[in-house]
Amino acid sequence: MTLSQALIGFAGIAFLITIIPATDTALVLRSLVARGRTAAFACILGITAGLLIWGIAAATGLAVLMATAPGVFDAITLAGGAYLIYLGVRFLLNLRHWGSVTALKTQDAALAILPTPETPGGKFDSASNPNAGVYRDFLAGFIANILNPKIAVFYIATVPPFMVATVPPLLMGTYLALIHGGINVAWFAVIVALASLSMKWLLHPRATLVIDGVAGTVLVIFGVTILWEAALSL
């Protein structure tokens, strides 16, 4: 696998993971509705900072593993492919709800946190300290990702299959983390820029299921491909 192939392949998976409504989406939407665009972008930057730290941490650990225990690295690669298949199957199973057209958990989670702003009027009073709300939203996004074990599992599972032999592991992992971070910022910037339209579309049950179906199919294909290539190299 060449460097360009690895970067493009990882970018595809990172994009699919990013656009699936989850905790990050709920946090950004809450910041946007409760305190406006600046707070939403602060939350986005906090989320992205968490992604970068996890990506670099995963790459540092992989560098040690590749030098001391190449067999363990191969095992992680196989586990990464299996994890992608597992994620894909989980998303595809959500299609069972297509006929019921009921709201998914992501919608319930987002709506549950939206009606609880800091003041009864629904807006954050930042007159006394304009930076307090922005810092709070940045910290909320950062903590949500840095303490989320699913982010750690994602990087540990997906970084190994996209490592390139000619690129130092730490540098390669940093490339991948920066790509994920860039996609994360770009996607949520679109949501903020097209707030009303984007929120209605993203939280619509059928739209969420369409995303799950596409993402699940692609993730399963990626996972099977990774397992097949890893098996041939053993």
Image (tube, rainbow, N blue to C red):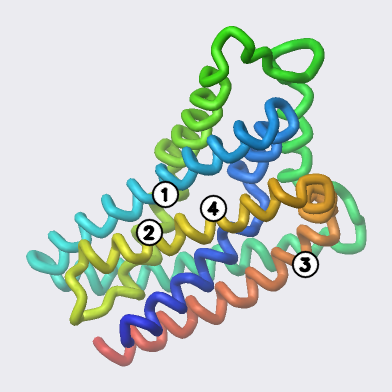
Mark 4 vs mark 3: which is more N-terminal? 4
Residue in the image at 58% along x and 40% along y: 41
Residue in the image at 50% along x and 79% along y: 222
Residue in the image at 79% along x and 48% along y: 199
Q: CA distance from mark 3 to mark 1?
A: 26 Å
Q: Which residue is mark 3?
A: 210
Give the residue type at disc 4.
Answer: Val
Q: Which residue is mark 2?
A: 177
Give the residue type at disc 1.
Answer: Leu
Instruction: Judge left or right: residue 34 versus residue 79.
Output: right
Neighbour class for label 1 at 10 Å: few (<14), some, many (≥20)? Answer: many
Give the residue type at disc 2.
Answer: Ala
Q: Secondary structure at mark 1?
A: helix
Comparing labels 4 and 2, the label whose residue is closer to the camera: 4
Q: Secondary structure at mark 4?
A: helix
Mark 3 vs mark 1: which is more N-terminal? 1
Q: CA distance from mark 4 to mark 2?
A: 12 Å
Q: Nearer the viewer, residue 79 or 7?
A: 7
Q: Is residue 229 above or below residue 100?
A: below
Looking at this rendering, what residue extends furthest in the right direction? 100
Q: Which residue is mark 1?
A: 51
Instruction: Judge left or right: residue 158 versus residue 111.
Output: left
**Residue 220 lies in what quarter of the image?**
bottom right
Q: Is residue 175 above or below residue 43?
A: below
Q: Which residue is mark 4?
A: 185
Neighbour class for label 2 at 10 Å: few (<14), some, many (≥20)? Answer: many
Mark 2 vs mark 3: which is more N-terminal? 2
